[in-house]
């Protein structure tokens, strides 16, 4: 297709040759913007796995500890696409454990949001609530949550309830503290502007403080998911018979390094996907912060 | 015509041609205000013992060194800060908070980053009921968008605009309700010299039509002389009114090339001396 077919005749008259060149360049540029970074990432990962494969096959490290990339990827693929045979050493396939872990994580993070977002907003909005709650929030936030795992096991045993509690507690504080900080740092001049143009307290809260705080909340949830992920894996490693954490322990016990590395890779993929998704949500909800994120 | 003021403005000002008799609108008596500094648990006096009366339809410019309390003074008129001592009255009533009779152009624009240009300008109508229909509001918004030359940017977000464009959004937002009192905090500071001149000219004509009372902060002596009926020179912090100067040059000054008059340069000289003294005394440190 020639250039002329792209433009209507009278329109193409308006374009000088220089403009056309610019257009072509621009379209290449936008193509690069859209797919360039993904292409680089794909290439990058391919090279990484090829080196891994060569290294594993060279025999420098025993394959019991360091599997080939192809073996690991195959295990991962099969584990995600098929169900376990009844006589398997480890009950359940990767997919079953993945779903179990994700369910625990989701429930825990949702609970953390349900408590943390209103809690943080209240703390930011009301000086008295802030005074009363802040020592506990900072205290619990600075306590390594792993230290609480044995306590919860004592209370609740190796139950889903225990795991959800750990996830909730791990995810709660980043969410709460971010929401709190968002309210507290809302630009004073924006509040003043809303007041001058007639906003009452409720309108200031819903029209200025909340939109201002929203990106903070999203950032908090993003961190919360990360912490919750750590929490759920640790809880599963401590005990129980389900989940990716359990699968890591089992694969170690059975010297199944392909499975172990597959699960580790899967964890990386899940974490990155969560970060990517929350970023997309942030860009959608808070486009004015786009420049900051990119 | 771009400068046409919508009908509502004539209603607000009662369609009066010349407000001959002086009717006080903004009255500050021995006003002292300041801020509570949270960190140091102490109070900072920004303005001390300010007494000034601003009449209806008057255009008062505030000049003074940075940090002397100019913004604080118009914040006190708008009701964002309240008097510590003395009083601030608008239309005979003590100011207890903001009201629809006063609108403000903010020094730092204070646009909601999550609202488009159009939505920022619509904001005053969302928070207060000014008795306008949806269609009238739309018309107003379109009119003032055009006035500040931002037609076509309705759907843009502030972060997509230049500093000067953001400032113009802030100006449109303050004008759109056609308030009786317009408070403008260095509204042209971020706008280039050429656009600035044309906006000064437009504002002069605009206000001479609407008969709004304007309190206008600027750092430019020329701008103050061109626009002001009176200029209040404020001394360093804690700010006091050092002198109030009447500018009795003919209107409309922009068209009449007032800058070439001998009175103009005389006036300029005099104000410059006042302001210079303040700037110099500042070199010896705080208070
Ligand atoms: N929100 C605030 N909290 C505490 N102190 C403030 C606040 N706003 C202003 N001040 C102080 O009050 C004094 C007067 O400030 P103001 O903003 O009125 O000055 P200004 O004359 O408008 O200066 P500029 O020309 O730089 O805008 C300054 O010394 C400043 O430090
Ligand atoms: Mg100021």
Image (spheres, grey):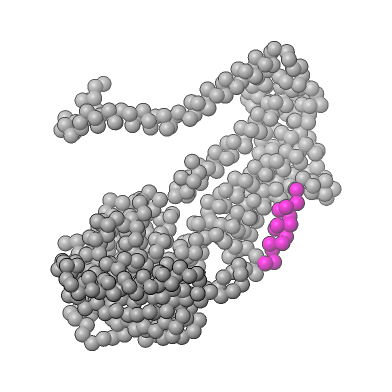
On the image, the x and y values in percent for residue B206 come to 22, 68
In magenta segment, residue A132 = yes
Please, which residue is most extreme toward the top here? A58
Check if residue A137 falls in the magenta segment.
yes
Residue A93 lies in quadrant: top right
Helix, strand or loop: magenta stretch:
helix
Picture coordinates of residue A187, whole percent (x, y): 50, 61
Residue B235, compared with residue B121, is above or below; it is: below
> Residue A152 vs residue B179: left or right?
right
Q: Nearer the viewer, residue B186 or A121?
A: B186
- Position of A285 compared to B92: left or right? right
- Find residue B74 and report its image quarter: bottom left
Could you tell me residue B126's position as x and y percent?
A: 39, 65
Q: Is residue A145 visible?
A: yes
What span is colored magenta in the figure? A131-144
Q: Please tell me in which quadrant of the rendered image residue B13 appears.
A: bottom left
Question: Residue at (29%, 82%) from the top-left corner?
Answer: B55
* Residue B236: image location, x then y, percent: 44, 73
Quadrant of the drawing holding the N terminus of chain B: bottom left
Residue at x 22% of width, y 28% of height? A17
Residue pictured at 55% horizontal, 43% vertical? A278
Residue nearest the viewer, comparing A44 with A283: A44
Q: Is residue B75 visible?
A: no
- Please indicate whether residue A166 sits to the left or right of residue A286 in the image: right
Q: With respect to residue A85, does A11 lie above or below?
A: below
Up/down of A90 relative to A123, above or below = above
Choose between A101 and A32: the one closer to the eye.
Answer: A32
Task: Tell me which residue sits at (55%, 24%) in the image.
Answer: A44
């Amino acid at each position: 297709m020639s250039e002329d077919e792209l433009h209507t005749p009278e329109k193409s008259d308006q374009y000088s040759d220089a403009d056309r060149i610019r257009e072509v360049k621009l379209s290449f540029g936008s193509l690069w913007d859209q797919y360039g970074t993904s292409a680089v990432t794909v290439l990058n990962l391919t090279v990484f796995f090829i080196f891994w494969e060569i290294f594993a096959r060279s025999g420098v490290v025993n394959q019991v500890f360091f599997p080939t990339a192809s073996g690991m990827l195959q295990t991962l693929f099969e584990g995600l696409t098929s169900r376990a045979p009844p006589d398997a050493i480890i009950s359940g396939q990767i997919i079953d454990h993945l779903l179990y872990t994700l369910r625990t994580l989701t429930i825990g993070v949702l609970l953390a949001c349900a408590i943390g977002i209103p809690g943080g907003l209240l703390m930011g909005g009301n000086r008295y609530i802030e005074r009363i709650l802040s020592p506990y929030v900072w205290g619990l936030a600075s306590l390594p949550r792993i230290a609480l795992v044995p306590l919860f096991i004592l209370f609740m045993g190796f139950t889903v309830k225990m795991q959800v509690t750990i996830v909730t507690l791990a995810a709660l504080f980043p969410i709460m503290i971010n929401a709190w900080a968002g309210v507290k740092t809302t630009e004073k001049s924006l509040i003043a502007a809303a007041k001058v143009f007639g906003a009452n307290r409720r309108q200031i809260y819903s029209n200025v403080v909340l939109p201002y705080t929203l990106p903070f909340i999203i950032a908090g949830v993003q961190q919360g998911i990360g912490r919750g992920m750590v929490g759920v894996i640790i809880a599963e490693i401590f005990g129980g018979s389900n989940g990716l954490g359990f699968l890591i322990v089992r694969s170690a016990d059975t010297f199944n390094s392909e499975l172990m590395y597959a699960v580790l890779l899967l964890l990386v993929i899940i974490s990155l996907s969560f970060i990517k998704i929350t970023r997309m949500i942030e860009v959608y909800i808070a486009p004015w912060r786009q420049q900051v994120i990119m | 015509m771009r400068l046409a003021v919508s009908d509502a403005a004539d209603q607000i000002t009662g369609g009066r041609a010349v407000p001959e008799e002086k009717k006080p609108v903004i009255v500050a008596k021995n006003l002292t205000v300041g801020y509570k500094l949270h960190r140091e648990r102490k109070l900072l006096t920004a303005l001390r013992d300010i007494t000034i009366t601003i009449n209806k339809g008057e255009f008062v410019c505030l000049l003074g060194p940075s940090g002397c309390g100019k913004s604080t003074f118009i914040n006190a008129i708008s009701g964002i800060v309240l008097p510590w001592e003395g009083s601030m009255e608008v239309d005979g009533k003590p100011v207890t908070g903001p009201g629809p009779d006063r609108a403000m152009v903010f020094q730092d624009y204070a646009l909601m980053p999550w609202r488009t240009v159009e939505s920022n300008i619509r904001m005053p109508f969302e928070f207060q009921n000014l008795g306008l229909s949806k269609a009238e509001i739309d018309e107003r918004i379109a009119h003032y968008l055009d006035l500040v030359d931002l037609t076509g940017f309705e759907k843009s977000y502030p972060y997509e605009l230049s500093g000067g464009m953001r400032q113009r959004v802030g100006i449109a937002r303050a004008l759109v309700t056609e308030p009786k009192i317009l408070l403008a905090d260095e509204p042209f500071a971020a706008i280039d010299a050429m656009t600035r001149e044309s906006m000064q000219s437009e504002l002069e004509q605009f206000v001479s039509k609407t008969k709004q009372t304007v309190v206008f902060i600027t750092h430019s002596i020329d701008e103050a002389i061109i626009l002001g009926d009176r200029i209040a020179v404020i001394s360093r912090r804690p700010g006091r009114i050092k002198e109030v100067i009447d500018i009795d040059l003919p209107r409309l000054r922009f068209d009449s090339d007032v800058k070439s008059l001998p009175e103009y340069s005389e006036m300029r000289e005099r104000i410059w001396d006042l302001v210079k003294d303040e700037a110099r005394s500042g070199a010896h440190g705080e208070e």
